[in-house]
Image (tube, grey):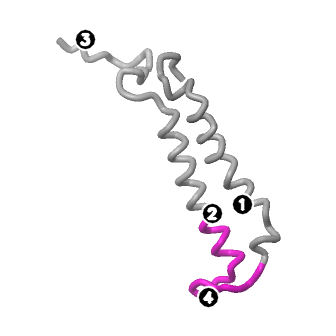
């Protein structure tokens, strides 16, 4: 992460990202809370659709964490072998 990016140094952003990345693991490891058959959703026992729901939630959380930590605008780095926009002129 670039040093000039205030989001990368903000403790609040780091805490939010940590919570977003740790929460799904806590949900997955709490098996006794969802190890049951009812309620069913579209014929699937609770155990299966709850896990599938958390797969989707995890993807959303990872996307949010990425959006919070990625560089923006001028902070984006160009690969060294990529042509710059000034070379074509």
In the drawing, what numbered circle is on residue 43?
A: 4
| Mark 1, residue position | 27
Q: In which quarter of the image is the N terminus?
A: top right
N-terminal of the pair, mark 1 or mark 4, is 1
**In the rendered structure, which disc, 4 or 3, sits on the residue that comes first in sequence?**
4
**Location of the C terminus (image quadrant):** top left
Q: Give percent across and percent down for residue 51.
A: 67, 68
Residues at discs 1 and 2 in contact (Cβ within 8 Å): yes
Q: Is residue 18 above or below residue 31?
A: above
For discs 2 and 4, the disc positioned in front in the rendered view: 2
Q: Which of marks 2 and 4 is nearer the N terminus?
A: 4
Q: Are marks 2 and 4 in contact (CB under 8 Å)?
A: no
Image position of 21 with respect to 71: above or below? below
Q: Which segment did they paint magenta?
A: 36-53
Q: How far apart are marks 1 and 4 (CA)?
A: 22 Å
Provide the residue designation for mark 2. 54
């Amino acid at each position: 992460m670039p040093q000039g990016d205030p989001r990368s140094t903000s403790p609040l952003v780091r805490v939010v990202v940590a919570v977003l990345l740790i929460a799904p693991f806590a949900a997955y490891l709490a098996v006794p809370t969802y190890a049951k058959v009812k309620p069913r959703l579209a014929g699937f026992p609770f155990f299966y659709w709850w896990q599938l729901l958390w797969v989707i939630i995890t993807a959303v959380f990872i996307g949010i964490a990425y959006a919070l930590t990625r560089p923006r605008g001028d902070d984006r780095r160009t690969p060294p072998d990529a042509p710059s926009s000034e070379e074509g002129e």
